[in-house]
Image (cartoon, rainbow, N blue to C red):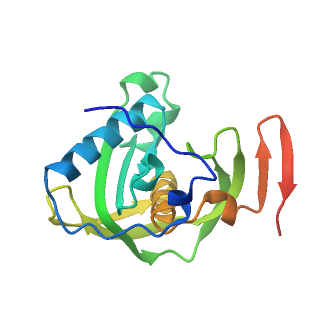
Amino acid sequence: MALRTIVTVPEPVLRRKAKTVTEFDEKLQTLIDDMVETMRAAPGVGLAAPQVGIAERVIVIEYFENEADEESEDPENAKKRLYTLVNPEITRASVDTEIAAEGCLSIPGVMGDVERHLAITVKGQNRRGQPVTLKLKEWTARIFQHEIDHLNGVLFTDLASKVWKPEGPVEDKV
């Protein structure tokens, strides 16, 4: 495993639609392992292949298995769940949405208020090519929506109603 460089805006790969993965070979396994290591080192909760300069439909996400664990007094020992998904697509989305702040490893130092579905169903494949269906809610659903957007060349700032640097507002978007 190796750390990969996280590309930042305006790197063109971040704006391209990523290609469907058709070969589940050693090269893909290495990419996934490297992405997990890179995400953890950043540190982040999700990473899409375009963020490491690879225009393929691969995401990795690591988040608390029980979202209440994030608020626990001992978050270091709370159990996180690692998701690795190839060719993910959202097949269902709740009507209910919520606006919350997001950031991105590819847009350092910037936050934005983004409206996301509270619950989604995602279909894709695991790292071995086997079909996977996930029913996700709340913050886990938000992270998946953010990472899947990366695979379509969409950044959170494109969807944000307000974008700011932590020290104050940058711009209001309509």
**In terms of image quadrants, where is residue 117?**
bottom right
**Quadrant that contains the N terminus:** top left
Q: Camera-side residue: 122 or 39?
A: 39
The furthest residue to the front:
12
Residue sitting at 26 percent across and 40 percent down?
A: 33
Q: Is residue 90 above or below residue 62?
A: below
How many marks do you count on the picture?
Answer: 0
Q: Is residue 22 above or below residue 142?
A: below
Q: Position of residue 2 (x, y in %)?
A: 30, 32
**Quadrant that contains the C terminus:** bottom right
The answer to whether residue 80 is visible is no
Q: Is residue 66 above or below residue 137?
A: above
Q: Is residue 151 above or below residue 8?
A: below
Q: Camera-side residue: 38 or 44?
A: 38
Q: Is residue 67 left or right of residue 2?
A: right
Residue sitting at 57 percent across and 65 percent down?
A: 154
Q: Position of residue 35 (x, y in %)?
A: 35, 42
Q: Position of residue 164 (x, y in %)?
A: 79, 46
**In terms of image quadrants, where is residue 50?**
bottom left
Q: Is residue 14 left or right of residue 83?
A: right
Q: Position of residue 42 (x, y in %)?
A: 48, 32
Q: Is residue 172 left or right of residue 141?
A: right
Residue sitting at 30 percent across and 39 percent down?
A: 34
Residue sitting at 45 percent across and 37 percent down?
A: 5
